[in-house]
Amino acid sequence: MVKILQASPNDIPAIRSMAEETWWPTYSPILTFEQIRYMLDAIYSAEALQRTMENGSQTFIILHDERGPQGFASYGPKPGSADVIKLHKIYVLPDNHGKGYGKLLIDEVKKRTLALKINTLDLNVNRYNKAKSFYEKIGFQVIGEEDVPIGPYWMNDYIMRLQLEV
């Protein structure tokens, strides 16, 4: 049975583990080892995750099945846009790709977004990440491009948007 629960600081070790397990196969074809390591250390350190949870900028949810945590997502208000929620992170363990877990996580974020009386959901995806086609299949459309600095590196992203049905 699959369930999606809101994460707490107690879930930080599971989130960190899933990030390590998903980032390498996802980004190794498009980013250097050094950049992946830097970003994992910067974004997914216990301290960074704790800070992000405590300051309220992102809410984390975790998808569990009978084997335990299998994926996670985080979302929050898009900076500078009071009427847009941004899906900051979404990762499903590689063994679960194709099972619909990513769609279940996005559906939960959509439900929570609508509960806030907001009907616009944005995300960024690396321009070379094959997940772009997944987002397009579920209705997201490219609305722009953005180059985001992370330390000494750059994420070359598409900005994608989904208008939610109220």
Image (cartoon, rainbow, N blue to C red):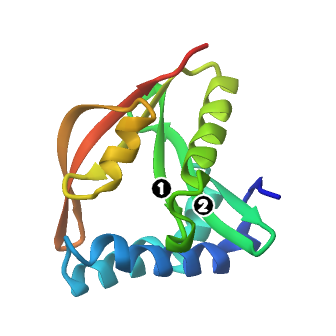
Q: Secondary structure at mark 1?
A: strand
Q: Is residue 22 left or right of residue 13?
A: left
The answer to whether residue 155 is above or below residue 28 is above
Q: Residues within 10 Å of mark 1 (few under 14, many from 20)?
A: some
Tell how many labels. Answer: 2
Give percent across and percent down for residue 35. 24, 79
The answer to whether residue 63 is above or below residue 108 is below
Quarter that holds the C terminus: top right
Residue at the far front in the pictured view: 98
Q: Is residue 164 visible?
A: yes
Residue at 49% from the left image edge and 80% from the top image edge: 21
Amino acid type, mark 1: Lys
- How far apart marks 2 and 1 lie (CA) works out to 8 Å
Residue at the far top in the pictured view: 166
Circle nearer the N terminus (2, 1)? 2
Residue at 69% from the left image edge and 59% from the top image edge: 63
Give percent across and percent down for residue 147. 16, 51
Quarter that holds the N terminus: bottom right
Residue at 17% from the left image edge and 74% from the top image edge: 152
Q: Is residue 46 visible?
A: no
Q: Residues within 10 Å of mark 2 (few under 14, many from 20)?
A: many
Give percent across and percent down for residue 56. 61, 50
Give percent across and percent down for residue 65. 76, 65
Q: Which mark is residue 89?
A: 1
Closer to the camera, 136 or 98? 98
Q: Secondary structure at mark 2?
A: strand
Amino acid type, mark 2: Phe
Q: Which mark is residue 72?
A: 2
Closer to the camera, 10 or 4? 4
Q: Is residue 53 left or right of residue 28?
A: right
The answer to whether residue 149 is above or below residue 88 is below
